Image (cartoon, grey):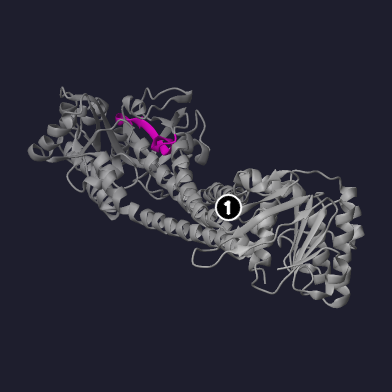
Amino acid sequence: MNIWKISIQNIKSKALYTFLSILTLALSIALLLGIQQIKNSFEHQLENNIGEIDLVIGAKGSPLQLILASVLHLDNPTGNIPYIDAKKLGKHPMVKTAVPISYGDNYKGYRIVGTTDKFLSLYHAEIASGRRVEHSLEVVIGHRVAERTGLKLGDTFLSSHGLVDNDIDVHNNKIKVVGILKPTGNVIDRLMITNLESIWEVHEHEQHNEDHDGYDKDHYGEEHLNHDDHDEDHLSEEHASHDDHNKYDEDHHDEQHSDHENHHEDDKEITSLLISFRSPAAFLTFPRRINEKTNMQAALPKFELDRLYEFTGIGLTTITWIAYLILLISGIIIFVSLYKMVKERSFDLALLRTYGASNLQLIKMVALEGLIVLIIAFSLGYLFVKVGLKYMFSFLSDNKQNMLQELPFEDVLQTTGMVFAVIVLSILIAIYPIIKMNISTILSNEK
Amino acid sequence: MIITENLKFQYNKQESPFNFPDIDLNSNENLLILGKSGIGKTTFLHLLAGLLTPTEGKVVINNTEINSLSQSKLDKFRGEHIGMVFQQKHAVQSLTVVDNLKARLFFSKKTLNDSKIETLLNSLDLLHCKNKKTNEISEGQLQRLGIALAVIHNPQVILADEPTSSLDDDNCKTVIELLIQQAAETKANLIVITHDQRIKSFFSNTITL
């Protein structure tokens, strides 16, 4: 027999209170840790996806849309910008790296991004097998894409037009997988990366082939209208290059076939330009100058995503407050449970004093009761979070990324510390009457 | 052995103090203290147990003046040398019969092997309910458990506060005989305070407050 065993027997003898205490406390711990982990995963995901991108330059429109499209690769782009303008900006002394990206096609819903070699280093992505893109119509695919589509090195596929998977508008050019990336945990896992020329070429080839096969200009017009049927925003790039090409075809109808591949890239357009600065000072002047002096827009990913996060954060904040409330209730339940024990069973405690127990031993006994409840509840709560979140995120597999992020130790410690503080306080308040307990009076009032 | 000298106790300064007669018991001597309700019987018993500190005078048990001990030493001393029996509530509710005895031993820092505990339980006819909670046994059984708890650690002094007043005649006789028998076995002084005249005949040594 020892104090532990007596505490455990005490807990067992008031099963309902113990059950309630453990349930509410576990629930509040699970909510607190769960919310923190979700919040953390979400923030980490966003930050990870921003990579080293300080600024995104694209066509005028919604800055948030531009960021969502060019950084998170979720929304449709705002439009296109001339490649020649982008190249000029990239040479600015304040700019460390400037990576152009160009959209147009997808394979089974995974976006094909035309870009340069530097895109991979923006996200610190490394090739797991194969090599980088060296020629047009070659792609390096992200880990997730490889996993989900089953594409392997050397496989070829036909891309479909636009950013949404469809079987109707499929290009004729076979694209070859030359490399697969290591998993990074960020957006690049679900992208297919090629060079800018591929994007331009796929669409040019198409038009030339069609032209070659005897399509007349009326057909061209139809083709055009078809494209208009798609979502207007994300096709605007397409749109523009078609327009471009129409003119080109009209002007140089005969000579173009031989030299179209050498066509000067300065006439081309890209979706956006991802920039990282040499020094933070550039944040002050560079974006403003672009927004004021050019017909392009500059958007700051961190700023836009923080704004987005503020909106989505409200729900999480509410749940966090609910969790605090439950923690408070649980603290009160534990307090009442122990206080009842101290008050209603004061005779038992006095009896233990006549057995030779010191005040300190009684305090230890009651405190242990509270601590046992706390530890069981904490373990349960932690288990709820682990199992619950795994289960939840396995349902959300359609987001094509492994979002769940382990909670950093400091955060767990912080929550743990707070929960312990609340519960230990409840225990201390409940214990206080023991110190003031008058055994003689309690024993005299036996009847 | 237990000696008191000139014991006085005052609950508050407005009231006149209780004056208690001196007692001087050698080992194996028993004492019955009779008195009406409110006369200070329980106060006297609590002074003897060191649960109350006298305003004046002293209590000496086995050559130790208990009032000179610090609180923690007094707790220890009480656990080791004193056993107490109460009127109705005898044991901790959340523990079983045998666990109560083990807790009693734990707090008085004494060990007793299981067979000795069982012998004691058997002698008090409690062996069959040793794993029952205290709210699952009868009042008579509970009373006997109270006696077991008062003697299990081999105390020098057994203090009983109205141990028989809620019992019928038969049980009253059984309990008081058991108490005297257990005290004799452990060579302890038995001091019983009561207003129950039925048990007068069991004691040769009686004082009336």
What's the residue at 65%, 57% (across, down)?
B47
* Structural crowding at the residue carrying mark 1, measured as other residues with C-alpha within 10 Å and reported as few (<14), some (14–19) or many (≥20): many
The part of the image, by quadrant, that contains residue A54 is top left
* Residue A276 visible in rendering: yes
Left or right, residue B115 beside residue B35:
right
- Magenta residues (range): A185-198
The answer to which of B69 and A343 lies nearer the viewer is B69
Assess whether residue B63 is covered by the magenta stretch: no
Residue annotated with mark 1: A370
Q: Which x, y percent locates residue B78?
A: 70, 49
In terms of depth relative to the viewer, which is nearer, A430 or A13? A430
- Is A193 inside the magenta-drawn segment? yes
Task: Tell me where residue A37 appears, x and y as whole percent.
Answer: 45, 45
Q: Is residue A102 left or right of residue A33?
A: left
Q: Residue visible at 67% across and 74% down? A: B37
Label 1: element kind: helix
As drawn, B159 above or below A94: below
